[in-house]
Every structure is written in C-alpha cells, then in structure tokens.
Amino acid sequence: MYEISGIYLIINKVNGKMYVGSAMNCKRRWSEHKTALNKNKHCKHGKCYLQHAWILYGAENFKFVIFENEIPTEDLLLWEQAVLDFYESYNPDKGYNNVKFAGSNRGWKPSQETLIRMSKAQKGKLFSLETRTRMSESQKNKPLITEETRVKLSETHKGEKHWNYGKTVPDDVCEKISNSVKGEKHNNYGKIASPEKLINMSKGRTGKYTGEQNPRSKLKIPQVIEIKTLLIEDKLTQREIAKIFAVGTTTIYNIARGKNWKHIVI
C-alpha cells in the first residue's frame, strides 16, 4: 500500500499534532523519516519540531497515515500545500512542519551559527564529473506542467488564498530596499559593458532583435499569444500569469503595456 505516491501524515497519538509530507514512494519516505529520527538527524540545520517531539514522546507514540494516494507526480506539491493549509501544521501549536510552503524553505530563517556551519561545510567542495553529469541528465526532459495543473495552481493563489493578500510593505522597509541597491551597493556599480555587448543592446532597442530573435527572450510567440489572451480575459492577475510561464512580473507588465512584444497583435 505504501509503495505509491501520495500525501502522508506523521501523527503524534498523544496530542494530535502532525507532520505533513508528500512522496513518490511513501513506504521508502517513512523508512527514511524513522531512520533519521532514531539517529537524531532528522533536520541538518536549525529547529526541527518533529525531532524534538520524537525524542520527548518516543517512537511508539507516533503513527504513519496515508492521507491521499495515487496522486499524479506533477500534483503532489499542490496537494501537499492544500493539506498544509488545511491542518496548519506549520503552526508550532498545531504541527511539526518547519516551513509554510510545500517543497520550499521559504519562511525558514537559519541562525548566524547555522549559516557559518553551512558555509564551512561547503568550502572547497567540488562535484565530480560523474555527479555533474547525473545532475545535468536529471534536469533534461522534465515533464511539462499540464494545463489542468496550471489551473489548479492558479485557483489556490487567487484572492484571499494568496500568501500576500492584504499585505502592504511598510515605508521603512521600502526605503531599506531602495538604499540597499543605491550607489556602490548596486550589482552593476563600476561595471563597464564591452563594445560587443553595447552593440547587441542597441540592436535590441532598435527592434533588430525583437521577440524570439532577442537572445535574452524566455518566451516564444505561442506563449505570448496565450499571455495576451489571458490579459484580455482579465481572470488572472499579472503575478499569477508570470508564475504560470515562469517569468518575472515585470515581463508580463511590459507585455500588458505594449512595451514588449508589441508586434504580436491579438
């Protein structure tokens, strides 16, 4: 039963708190959890609520439950996020998940001591040719996100469901961000573009490298047509459209204004 993909829960039988996770092979993932927990190595960095609870209550007071099985691989994180939000297991009062977002370390802030330890562990570390080749091959021919999955992802981030809904950036934070990229702090400060790069930049601005001909373009004409159609329908925000096509919000904004891809007319 466990040798299938799905969403699983590790539940504390004493207080009902839980850890939510997803896996391609739930049986193997549960085995990995138990091995790490029994060796007190469940989390390599920072806090680990599940590890602390495992030590405090003992292994016999935890049970492993399959919440949902036979979920398509491309939908696993979508399901995991939905279950995380439902049980709020990222809240220390309700569960043992360290972060709020499935498949992400967003929200986790390592201590200075942890950062130093991580830095030392990575110094002088080189990947072998075999490892680099394996990493490269693993990124090739990845399955594309289906249209159905894109719609599901979009729905989970609309309106009040969006993680940034109703939030505003305070003025002092805006000022700090602005000051952090001024003058010598700017990443291009003191850099001089080569003559070749200046020529290419000039061609791009004069329209000789427009659309797909621009070497910096991440989009193809069919994608731009789809983006412009979504903008006209006005059912998704520009941020949501940007996430679907894996580009920046500025790219969608410039397309909407007609600054970029203006030669494609819908």
Image (cartoon, rainbow, N blue to C red):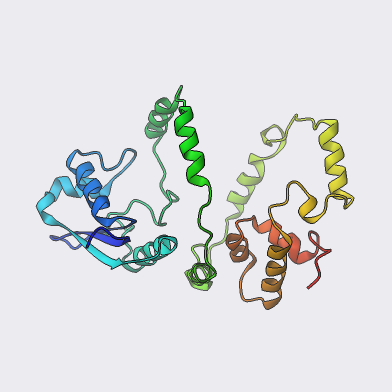
Judge by depth and name the residue closer to the eye, 228 or 160: 228
Residue occupying image coordinates x 61% and y 72%: 236
In percent of width and height, residue 59 lies at 13, 50
Quarter occupied by the N terminus:
bottom left
Residue occupying image coordinates x 33% and y 40%: 46
Judge by depth and name the residue closer to the eye, 55 or 185: 55
Q: Residue furthest top?
A: 124
Q: Considering only vertical position in the picture, is 119 above or below 63? A: above
Left or right of 122? Residue 49 is: left
In percent of width and height, residue 10 lies at 22, 57
In percent of width and height, residue 64 lies at 19, 59
In percent of width and height, residue 81 lies at 40, 63
Q: Residue furthest right?
A: 206
Residue 250 picture quarter: bottom right
Left or right of 48? Residue 54 is: left
How many numbered marks, from 0 up?
0
Judge by depth and name the residue closer to the eye, 106 or 92: 106
- Residue 131 visible in the snapshot: yes
Quarter occupied by the C terminus:
bottom right
Judge by depth and name the residue closer to the eye, 164 or 176: 164
Residue occupying image coordinates x 36% and y 66%: 71
- Residue 94 visible in the snapshot: no
Left or right of 148? Residue 25 is: left
